[in-house]
Amino acid sequence: MIAQVAEGIMAEFTGSALSTSVGGRIWRDSAPQNTTMPYIVFTSISNTQYDTYNEDLEYHHIMFYIYVNLETTGYTGLDALESALRALFDNTVLTISGWTDLMMRWMGSRPANSEDDKVIGIMVEYETYIQNT
């Protein structure tokens, strides 16, 4: 169900203030080389299936990476993008075909490393449970 969760994330992102702030640049797993900044990449870190009392339940651990150009956007701009991402996804319920999302829950944020001194980033971690409907 990783693809369905990714579709739910993309649906929530599309048309949002965050989408406008990053020029619609969000990718699953990796961004194309030489992508204009700022941009976001998200990936599923892990997922686990649970079968409990006739319910089909899955746990998903998702990581968002926000990257900006230090010279043009700076730390203030990066902080603003993290706030916009959290405003969009904290406690949101994704629309997932055939499944019910119980709620996206923020787990934490920390710096994202880059090999380029002009690029700074942040990792924003979420978890969610989805239930087969």
Image (cartoon, helix red, strand yellow):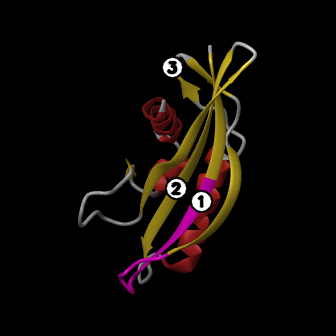
Q: Tell me which label, 2 or 1, sits earlier in the chain.
A: 2
Which numbered marker is on residue 101?
A: none
- Please, what is the three-letter code of the amino acid marked with disc 1? Val
**Residue 14's spot in the image, x, y percent?**
46, 39
Name which quarter of the figure residue 79 lies in: bottom right
Name which quarter of the figure residue 69 lies in: bottom left
- Please, what is the three-letter code of the amino acid marked with disc 2? Phe
Q: To which residue does mark 2 refer?
A: 64
**Residue 42's spot in the image, x, y percent?**
46, 51
**Residue 53's spot in the image, x, y percent?**
75, 16
In the image shown, does 115 or 132 lie closer to the viewer? 132
Residue 28 left/right relative to 86: left
Q: Decide: few, some or many residues near mark 3? Use Cα within 10 Å; few <14, some 14-19, many ≥20.
A: some
Q: To which residue does mark 3 refer?
A: 97
Using the numbered discs, state the Cα–Cα distance from disc 2 to disc 3 in whole angstroms: 22 Å
Up the image or down, 72 lies above or below 20; here it is below
Q: To which residue does mark 1 refer?
A: 124
- Marks 2 & 1, CB-CB < 8 Å contact: yes
- Please, what is the three-letter code of the amino acid marked with disc 3? Ser
Residue at screen point 53% across, 36% down: 12
Q: Tell me which label, 2 or 3, sits earlier in the chain.
A: 2
Using the numbered discs, state the Cα–Cα distance from disc 1 to disc 3 in whole angstroms: 25 Å
Residue 78 left/right relative to 32: right
